[in-house]
C-alpha cells in the first residue's frame, strides 16, 4: 500500500499532539504525569510525604531550601483512525477511497513508529474497528483490515460516537464530511472521551472545482437520488459558496472541540498530503 | 402598412418550431456525485424536462419567441407609406470654383463643403441615397446614387477644387439626369455662389436647396500685370473688400526678390504700381502681395518678359493682308512672304502657310492651308457653297479658346468631307470650316477664303491665328501666359524624343513618348511651368506661365442662390414613399438574441 520511498519519507515524520497524553505503558509521548525519566521537567518545594530520593541536594546547598526535581513522564498514546467508508467515497476522479486508505495507512505508520497504540475504524454500512494494535505486526494487520473494507451505504456523524474509544489520544476522521447532519455534536463527544479530534477532509478535484456545464442529471452516490440540472457559471458559483460554508462549519466543529481540521485532494500524492499536515501543524519532523 | 415580401411569412414557422423543441424532453448525460446538497435545483426553461409537459412561463422561451417573431417580420419587409422625407435621392453638387479655395472658414470653403456632404452621407436613413457631382470646369459625377456612406466617402475623397471658373449649367444638366425617374429627389448646391450660371435659368427637375459656404468678402489680389516699357512693370492691385488695406508688393525677378513696394488700397478700389527696377535679361517677373488673405490664388501674378524664340514662317500668297498682320502679331515670328511662283520646295521653315494654293507633291509640315481651291490640299475640296450659320465652338478646344464666332459669317466655302484622322474645329451648319489633322504631321486647313468672310474683321481672327500658331509651331507655347485651367498644347520640336513638364509645385508630368504629346491639363495652379524636351542635340528647356485672372472669382463674398426654374415634377406634390421597417426589426431580433444569450449564461 505504501512504497519504500513513501515509507522512507514517513520515517522522518511524527504526529504532533496538542496535549500531553496519559497511557498505560511507557512510550514516546509526553505524559501529564510526573515520573522518573531522563527528561527534566521542573522544581517544586518539598512537602511532607515526598520521596527523599527526589530531593535536589545541590539546590539545597545553594538555596538552603529543600526542592524536589520533577521529570517528564513519557508514555504511549492511542491513535484512533476513523475512515468514512460510505458510498460517496467511491466517487470522484480519482476516487476518494483509495486515497483515504493510503492516508490512514500513512498516519498509522507514524503512530506505530512513535510507540503509539493504533486502532482503525470505519463509518458506513458496517461499523468495524480493529483493537488497539502495537508492535511489528500491527501495520500489516491494519493494511489487511483496510483492504478488506468495501465502501458502501451511508455514513452519519452519530456513528462516530458509536465507536468505543476507551483510551485517551487522538482521533483522526478521514471523510468528505458530505452530510446534511452537523458534525459538531459527534466531534464534541470525542472531546468528552479525552480524544483530540483531527478532521481530515478529503475531496476529489472535481468536487473542489466542478467542471460541469450545461444540462446534466446528477445522481447522489449514497441515496441514489437524481437531480436534473442546467449548470451555469452562476450555479457553480453558488456550489462553491455552499461548499466553503459547509467546510467552515466543520472547521468550527473541530476547533470547538479543541481539535483541528484540514483538507486535501484525492489527486494529491502522499508527499503533498503530509506537507498539508505539516502546514497545519498536525505532522512534524 | 404593407408587406413588400410576403413570402417571408414562411419564417413564422420558426415560432411553432421553437415551441416544439420546448415540448420535447432533453436527454441529459448522467454523472454520479458525492452529494446534491450544494447544488441548488435549477433547470433552464428553454426545453422541457418531461415529454409533452405543460408549457411553463419562461423568460428564455419568451425571448426566443420574440426574436423569431422579429426576424420573421423583418423578412417580410413591412413598410409604412408616408409622404416626403421617407426615402428619396439627394444630389449634392460641390462647387469647385477657384473662390472655394478661400480659407475664411477652415480649412477652406471647399473642405468645409466636402465635410457637409460627408455629414449628409452619414445621416442617410433607410431607403435614402445620395449622389455627388463635382462642379469643375466640366461637371463630373463623382458617385452615382448610393446609400453606402463608404462609397460616398471614397467619392468625396477624390474631390478637388479647380483654379478657375466652373459651369453651373452643365452641373444642373447632370443632376437632372441623375434625378430623372426618382420622385421625391432633391438637389443641394454647396458653394459660395461663384459658379457661372447659364444665361437663362436652368430647369431643375427636383427640389433645389442652396447651402452657402463662406464667411467673408475681404480679399485683395493682383488684377493686372504688364510691361509698359523696357525695364518697367505695371501692376494693378484690387481690394475687393470693404476695408482699406495696407499691403506690400514683392517683386521677384526670375524667382529672386528684387524689390518690396508698400501699397495702400482703399476698400472696393484699385491701386496702380509702376516698378522700374527690372534688370535687363529678366525672363519672368513675379508680383506677390503680402500679407496673405482669404484667397491665395490671386495674390501672385506673373509676367513673361522674355521673347519667344525666333521662328521662321513662310507665307505663300498672292495677297492676304489679314493673314499677314495676324501672323506678325506674335513676337519672334520671322515672316517670309512669297508668291506661289517663287515657292521652291526644300527650303526649311518652322511653319508653312499656303493661302489659296498648295504645292504639288508632298506637303511640307507643319502647315496651315487656306482654301486651296485647285484641289491639291490635304483634304479634297468640292464645289463652293454657302455653308450657312457658323456654329459656336468648343471653348475647351485649344484651337478655339477665346474665339467668339457669334457675329461671324462666311459667304462661300468649299464643300469638304472630314477624312479619317482629322477633326472639325470650326463648322457651319452645312460644311466644316476649319479642320485639324490629329497628331503628326501638324496641319490645319481652312475651307474658305478669308476674304469671303467677315472673320478677319472680328477680334476672333487674330486670336484664332495665335491659337493655330501655338498648335502648329514647334515650341509655340514658350513664354506664353495661359489662364488657370486652360488646356495647353505643347508642340514639340521635330527631333524631340521625350517631353515632360514640371509644375510650380515641383511635380513632373511626362507627356511623351508616345508622340504626339498629349495636351497638358494640370494647369490649376498659377506659376511658371518648365517644359523639357529631350532632343538629339541635348535637352531643350523652356517655360510658360499659368495665371489666375478672374476678378469675379476674386470677389469672394458669398453669392446668392442661382436662379433656377423648377419643372413640374419638382413642383409636384411630394410623392408618397414607403419607409421600410426591416432594419429596425432585424436590430431588435439581434438585441433579443443577445439578451437571451446573456440571460442563459448569467443564470437565474
Image (cartoon, rainbow, N blue to C red):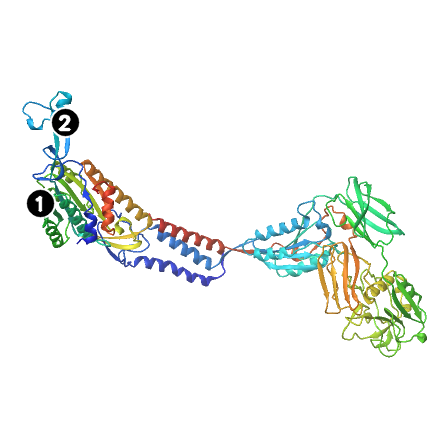
Viewer-proximal residue, B196 or B471?
B471
Say whether marks 2 and 1 touch (CB < 8 Å).
Answer: no
- Residue B364 in the image, given as x and y percentages of width and height: 85, 74
- At horizontal 39% and vertical 61% (from top left) the residue drawn is B13
Above or below: residue B156 compared with residue B386:
above
Q: Secondary structure at mark 1?
A: loop
Viewer-proximal residue, A145 or A111?
A111
Residue furthest out toward the bottom:
B361
How dense is the environment of label 1, judged by Cα within 10 Å: few (below 14), some, or many (20 and up)? some
Viewer-proximal residue, B368 or B128?
B368
* Mark seen at residue A196: none
Q: Chain of mark 1?
A: A
- Residue B585 in the image, given as x and y percentages of width and height: 46, 54
- Residue B459 in the image, given as x and y percentages of width and height: 87, 60
* Mark seen at residue A132: 1
- Residue B397 in the image, given as x and y percentages of width and height: 77, 64
Nearest to the eye among marks 2 and 1: give it: 2
The residue at which mark 2 appears reads as A43
Nearer-N-terminus badge (2/1): 2
In this rendering, does residue A273 appear at all?
yes
Badge 2 and badge 1 in a common chain: yes
Amino acid at each position: 500500500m505504501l512504497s519504500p520511498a513513501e515509507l522512507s519519507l514517513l520515517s522522518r515524520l511524527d504526529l504532533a499532539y496538542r496535549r500531553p497524553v496519559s497511557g498505560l505503558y511507557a512510550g514516546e509521548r509526553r505524559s501529564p504525569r510526573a515520573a522518573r525519566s531522563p527528561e527534566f521537567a521542573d522544581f517544586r518545594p518539598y512537602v511532607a510525604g515526598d520521596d527523599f530520593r527526589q530531593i535536589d541536594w545541590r539546590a539545597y546547598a545553594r538555596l538552603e531550601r529543600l526542592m524536589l526535581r520533577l521529570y517528564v513522564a513519557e508514555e504511549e498514546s492511542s491513535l484512533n483512525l476513523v475512515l468514512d467508508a460510505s458510498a460517496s467515497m467511491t466517487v470522484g476522479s480519482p476516487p476518494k477511497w483509495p486515497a483515504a486508505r493510503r492516508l490512514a495507512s500513512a498516519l498509522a505508520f507514524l503512530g506505530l513508529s512513535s510507540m503509539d497504540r493504533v486502532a482503525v475504524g470505519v463509518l458506513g454500512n458496517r461499523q468495524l474497528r480493529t483493537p488497539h494494535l502495537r508492535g511489528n505486526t500491527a501495520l500489516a494487520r491494519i493494511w489487511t483490515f483496510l483492504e478488506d473494507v468495501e465502501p458502501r451505504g451511508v455514513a452519519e456523524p452519530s456513528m462516530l460516537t458509536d465507536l468505543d474509544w476507551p483510551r485517551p489520544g487522538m482521533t483522526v476522521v478521514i471523510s468528505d464530511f458530505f452530510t446534511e447532519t452537523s458534525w459538531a455534536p459527534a466531534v464534541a463527544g470525542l472531546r468528552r472521551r479525552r480524544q483530540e479530534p483531527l478532521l481530515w477532509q478529503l475531496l476529489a478535484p472535481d468536487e473542489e472545482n466542478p467542471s460541469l456545464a450545461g444540462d446534466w442529471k446528477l445522481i447522489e452516490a449514497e441515496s441514489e437520488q437524481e437531480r436534473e440540472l442546467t449548470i451555469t457559471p452562476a450555479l457553480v458559483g453558488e456550489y462553491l459558496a455552499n461548499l466553503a460554508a459547509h467546510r467552515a462549519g466543520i472547521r468550527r466543529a473541530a476547533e470547538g472541540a479543541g481539535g483541528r481540521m484540514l483538507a486535501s485532494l484525492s489527486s494529491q500524492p502522499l508527499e503533498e498530503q503530509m506537507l498539508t499536515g505539516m502546514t497545519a501543524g498536525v505532522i512534524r519532523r | 402598412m404593407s408587406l413588400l415580401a410576403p413570402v417571408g411569412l414562411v419564417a413564422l414557422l420558426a415560432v411553432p418550431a421553437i415551441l416544439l423543441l420546448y415540448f420535447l424532453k432533453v436527454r441529459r448525460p448522467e454523472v454520479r456525485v458525492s452529494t446534491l446538497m450544494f447544488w441548488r435545483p435549477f433547470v433552464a426553461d428553454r426545453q422541457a424536462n418531461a415529454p409533452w409537459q405543460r408549457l411553463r412561463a419562461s423568460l428564455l422561451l419568451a425571448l426566443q419567441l420574440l426574436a423569431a417573431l422579429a426576424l420573421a417580420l423583418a423578412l417580410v419587409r413591412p413598410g409604412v407609406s408616408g409622404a416626403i422625407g421617407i426615402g428619396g435621392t439627394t444630389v449634392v453638387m460641390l462647387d469647385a470654383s477657384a473662390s472655394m479655395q478661400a480659407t475664411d472658414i477652415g480649412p477652406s470653403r471647399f473642405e468645409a463643403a466636402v465635410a457637409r456632404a460627408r455629414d449628409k452621407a452619414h445621416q442617410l436613413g433607410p431607403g435614402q441615397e445620395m449622389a455627388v457631382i463635382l462642379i469643375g470646369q466640366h461637371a463630373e459625377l463623382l458617385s452615382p446614387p448610393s446609400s453606402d456612406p463608404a462609397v460616398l466617402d471614397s467619392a468625396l475623397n477624390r474631390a478637388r477644387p479647380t483654379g478657375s471658373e466652373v459651369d453651373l449649367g452643365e452641373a444642373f444638366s447632370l443632376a437632372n439626369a441623375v434625378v430623372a425617374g426618382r420622385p421625391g429627389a432633391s438637389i443641394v448646391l454647396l458653394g459660395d455662389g461663384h459658379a457661372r450660371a447659364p444665361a437663362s435659368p436652368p430647369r431643375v427637375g427636383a427640389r433645389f436647396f442652396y447651402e452657402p459656404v463662406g464667411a467673408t468678402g475681404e480679399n485683395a489680389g493682383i488684377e493686372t500685370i504688364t510691361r509698359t516699357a523696357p525695364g518697367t512693370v505695371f501692376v494693378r492691385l484690387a481690394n475687393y473688400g470693404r476695408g482699406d488695406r495696407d499691403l506690400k508688393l514683392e517683386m521677384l525677378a526670375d524667382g529672386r526678390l528684387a524689390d518690396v513696394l508698400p501699397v495702400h488700397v482703399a476698400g472696393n478700389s484699385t491701386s496702380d504700381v509702376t516698378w522700374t527696377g527690372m534688370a535687363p535679361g529678366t525672363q519672368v517677373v513675379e508680383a506677390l502681395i503680402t500679407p496673405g488673405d482669404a484667397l491665395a490664388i490671386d495674390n501672385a501674378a506673373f509676367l513673361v518678359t522674355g521673347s519667344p524664340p525666333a521662328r521662321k514662317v513662310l507665307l505663300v500668297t498672292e495677297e492676304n493682308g489679314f493673314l499677314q498682320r495676324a501672323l506678325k502679331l506674335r513676337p519672334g515670328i520671322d515672316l517670309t512672304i512669297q508668291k506661289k511662283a517663287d515657292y521652291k520646295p526644300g527650303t526649311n521653315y518652322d511653319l508653312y502657310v499656303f493661302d489659296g494654293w498648295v504645292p504639288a507633291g508632298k506637303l511640307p509640315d507643319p502647315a496651315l492651308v487656306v482654301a486651296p481651291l485647285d484641289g491639291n490640299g490635304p483634304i479634297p475640296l468640292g464645289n463652293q457653297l454657302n455653308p450657312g450659320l457658323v456654329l459656336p465652338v468648343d471653348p475647351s478646344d485649344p484651337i478655339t479658346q477665346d474665339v467668339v464666332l457669334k457675329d461671324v459669317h462666311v459667304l462661300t466655302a468649299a464643300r469638304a468631307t472630314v477624312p479619317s484622322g482629322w477633326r472639325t474645329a470650326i463648322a457651319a451648319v452645312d460644311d466644316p470650316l476649319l479642320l485639324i489633322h490629329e497628331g503628326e504631321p501638324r496641319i490645319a486647313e481652312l475651307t474658305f477664303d478669308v476674304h469671303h468672310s467677315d472673320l478677319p474683321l472680328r477680334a476672333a481672327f487674330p486670336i484664332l491665328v495665335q491659337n493655330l500658331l501655338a498648335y502648329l509651331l514647334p515650341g509655340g507655347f514658350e513664354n506664353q501666359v495661359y489662364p488657370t485651367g486652360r488646356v495647353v498644347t505643347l508642340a514639340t520640336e521635330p527631333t524631340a524624343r521625350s517631353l515632360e513638364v514640371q509644375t510650380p509645385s515641383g511635380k513632373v508630368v511626362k507627356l511623351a513618348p508616345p508622340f504626339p504629346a498629349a495636351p497638358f491639363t494640370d494647369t490649376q495652379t498659377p506659376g511658371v511651368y518648365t517644359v523639357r524636351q529631350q532632343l538629339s542635340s541635348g535637352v531643350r528647356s523652356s517655360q510658360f506661365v499659368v495665371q489666375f485672372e478672374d476678378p469675379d472669382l476674386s470677389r469672394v463674398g458669398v453669392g446668392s442662390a442661382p436662379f433656377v426654374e423648377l419643372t413640374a415634377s419638382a413642383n409636384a406634390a411630394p410623392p408618397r414613399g414607403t419607409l421600410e421597417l426591416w432594419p429596425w426589426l432585424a436590430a431588435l431580433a439581434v438585441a433579443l438574441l443577445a439578451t437571451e444569450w446573456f440571460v442563459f449564461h448569467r443564470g437565474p
